[in-house]
Amino acid sequence: MTAALAALAVSGCAGLPVGTAVPLAGISGEEIGFDDLGVDASLGKLLVPCGRTGAVYLLDPETGENAPLRAFPSVSGRGQGHDTGVTSADSGMGLVFASDRNTRSLKALDPRSGRVEAAVALNGKPDYVRFVDPTHEIWVTEPKSRQIEIFSIVRLGKALSLMRSGAVQVPGGPESLVIDPERGIAFTNSWKETSFEISLSGRRIIARWRNGCAKSRGLALDEADGFLFVGCGEGKATTLDVLHGGKPLSSMGSGRGVDIIAYDPGLRHLYVPGAEDSTLAVASVGRRGNLTPLRMFQTAPGAHCVVAHGRRFWVCDPRRGRLLRFDDR
C-alpha cells in the first residue's frame, strides 16, 4: 500500500467509510459467489451474475429494486466461492449474454420477458463474457483452455442462434477482457506480468506489454485517452498508454487481493478492491494517466468485484449474497 493510502487507512482506523447493503431478491444472506459485474446501458440496470443461484439479476441503480433472470440450474451447497455457476454477463442488441461454469454453456436472454432466446455449448470452462458491438459477436474467455472462444449472433426470421466462429489463443491467459469498439481492439492479460492487445477483426494478438504486475488480474479502460488500467493481485494498480506502445505511466498500491477493477470516465476515478483486506481504494486519474489516491472504503471479506455507474459504485459481498452501494462525491 502506498504511503498516501496508508495514511488514509490510519485516519479511518476507528472505521473506514462503509457502504449501504443492497439485498438481492430471494437471497437470504447466504454465500452464493460473485465474479463479474456490469451495466446494461439500454435498460439503465446493473448486471449482477449471482454464482450458484444460476441467475443474472437486473438491479435498478436508483431504487435498488432487482429481479433475477433465471438462466441456468442452481447449484446446491455452501461456500462455493466464485468458481461456480453463472459468474459473467454482458448485454447488446437488446439481449443479455451469460455464461455458466457448471454446464459450460452460453445463453442469450431477453431481459424483458426472461426467455432464453439461444444457447450453445462452450469448449472450455468460461470466465468473462463480452459483447463486441462492431462485429456483433460474443467473446468468452476460457483460461484453462488458454483461449477466447468467439460466437456470432445469427438471426433467421424470429429465430436466434449462437454459432462458434473462431478463437484467439492467449498464452498464459486469458485473464479479464475489455473491448475498445472505436479502435477495434480487445485487451486481456496473462496470469502474471503481461497484457495483450488483440485485433477484433483479425482475431489475433498484435502486441504484448509488461504491465508491472506480478499477478495480472482485472482490466479497465479509458477509451477517450487510451489508458489501460491493470489490477495486480499482490495489491496495486497500474496504467498503460495503449496509444503509445503500452508505455507504463503510473502505479498505485492498494489493499491485497485485487481482482476485478472499475473506472468511471466522468469522474475519472479508478476503483480497486482488496478482497483480502476488505477495503477498496479510489484513485483519481490525471490527464497523463497518473494515479492519485483519494480515499479508502471498508467493504467485506472476499469482496473482489466492483462496478461504477452514475457517481456511485457497487461492491460484491459474496459471503452474504448482496451488494454494497457507495456514493462517490
Image: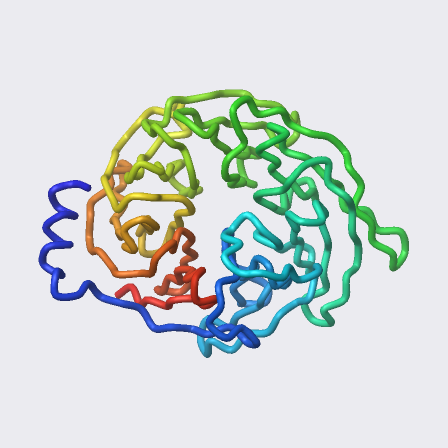
Taking the spot 45% from the left edge, 60% from the top edge, the residue there is 318
Please state if 212 lies on the left or on the right of 309 as rendered. left
Q: Is residue 54 left or right of residue 160?
A: left
Q: Is residue 89 visible?
A: no
Q: Name the foreground residue: 264 vs 89.
A: 89
Near-viewer residue (253 or 202): 253
Q: Is residue 191 above or below residue 298?
A: above
Where on the picture, by quarter, is residue 55? bottom right
Q: Is residue 228 above or below residue 48?
A: above
Q: Locate residue 218: give its quadrant.
A: top left
Q: Position of residue 325 (x, y in %)?
A: 37, 68
Q: Position of residue 192 (x, y in %)?
A: 41, 27
Please state, as top left, top right, bottom left or bottom right, where the N terminus lies in the image.
Answer: top left
- Image x and y of residue 53, in percent: 61, 63
Q: Which residue is pictured at 27% across the width and 41% down the height?
A: 287
Q: Residue at x 63, y 47 (%)?
A: 131
